[in-house]
Amino acid sequence: MNYDWIKTRADYDEVKAAIIDPAKGTQWSYQDLNARADNLANYMQEQGIKRGDVVGIFAPNDVAIFDLLFASFKMGAVYLPINWRLKPKEIQSIIADSGVKMIFYSLRHKESLTGTPEELLHMDIDSPEYDEICNPKNHREFETVNVESEDLAALMYTSGTTGLPKGVMFTYESFVANVINAALTYKVTGDQTTIISTPTFHVLGLNDTALPLIMAGGTLVLHRYFDGAQLNELMSKFKPDYLIMIPTMYYGMLVADNFDIKNFENIKYLIQGGSSPLPAVQKKFESMGQTLINGYGLTEAPLTMVNTPHNSKVKPMSIGKSIMYVESKLLDDEGNEVEVGEIGELAVKGKNVTPGYWNKPEETAKVFKNGYFLTGDLAKKDEDGDIFIVNRKKELIITGGENVLPSEVEAALSEHPMVRTAIVVGYDSPEYGESVSAAIVLAEETENFEEILDKHVRERIAGYKIPRLYLEMKEIPLNSTAKPDRLEIQRLMNEKAKENGVA
């Protein structure tokens, strides 16, 4: 089957702006996007890239993201966006695990690719050479290959929630099914515009925001790196029809000096996902006549549930119900569906759900039960069928839309000889939803232990995983099963955060 849908979009669409890049002062039509992808596909084929080969990109929100994605679809290659916020060790695990053959990169982030074999670092996407290769004026048509719907189309790695990132597989069917589902759910049309601020190495940015609009024939404005004040300027200039972002981004807009609710005059809806809602932010927007709607998904199943504008006013913390062509259940530990009001693990099923993890059949088997994917999120359902996320089954911390596994941070802290015990928990943050904190039992008293540990962990883990708050303890409190009482530690941490005004 032919999955070269950007060519079809170009054939059917009028000449109009498909992607606008204010930072570079460029814009590209659908015809341009197809030509750029044709050119890049021809180029990569000449470099020896074949069907089934993995090709990667390490870059911010840029037209190159779409060049490589659409070129990969034309070639039958496997598209790999790499999270540039990770530490070199984490990035190298992705490069080694994926077997990537070629990486396009932004020079600004090349330092984070330290340790990557030089032959894999192919080209700077901001270079004149790259621009010349993709230039639509040099269009060379590419003969699209036919692929099977179950063939691997893309790999997107998790944010290290099991210590090191896992490669989530997308088939052509699962990848495209999610884009279609999102476009139908959000009622995206070709006369709409949105701004993409969420990183496109995440499914929220790429699969749920950018691609549904492009498939529908609308106009996508690129925000290269999120900044609240910059986004407010883009809002003023482009007056988008909707926004889909993580809650902390809405917070960043609100606290910027140039925030103006008048910039939202064309807004039909505001979706937030990727981390827990920020009630204070929701209330602020509500007071100005705008409702933030909760959506739900994860790398393994990008969009599965979303609330409605009306229901969000009544149940602001709900993620609503399953979208079209997606089924969901709440299961107990034995795999039985729980009753209304009871807590169970959210399990989802649909064509947009991943078939599993790359090269990890045992891990894959663990996360499926009777055809349903186990999300790891604990939730409950009310009498109307609306779903509410209660907690994360494995104590995962989500800070600013990024996943942090406490055990990874604890391991990094414990490598320092002054640390006897380290327990990492999330605490409430008005800016990030949750922030990372650590309760520490020291082997010996040290006055500036916080500064020492901060420097120590910065050399080992990504910046967003570093504790923003430390609590020195003589002993770690234990629960009735003699395990660390994380709920009590979290309570104490929230108290300290309030006292110190730490976000």
Image (spheres, rainbow, N blue to C red):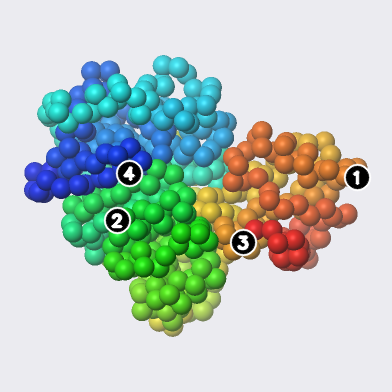
Q: Which mark is residue 429?
A: 3
Name the N-terminal-most of marks 1 and 3: 3
- Find residue 168 and report its horizontal and vertical position in percent: 41, 43
Q: Disc 2 on helix, strand or loop?
A: helix
Q: Which mark is residue 22?
A: 4
| Point 33% across, 37% down: residue | 24
| Point 9% across, 48% down: residue | 14
Tag in front: 2 or 1? 2
Instruction: Quote the CA–CA distance across marks 2 and 1.
Output: 56 Å
Q: Are marks 2 and 4 in contact (CB under 8 Å)?
A: no
- Read off the residue under disc 2: 238
- Residue 311 sits in which quadrant? bottom left
Q: Which three-letter amino acid code belongs to the residue tagged 4?
A: Pro
Q: Disc 4 on helix, strand or loop?
A: loop
Towards the viewer: 190 or 436: 190
Tag in front: 1 or 3? 3
**Is disc 2 surrounded by few (<14), some (14 to 19) or many (20+) residues within 10 Å?**
some
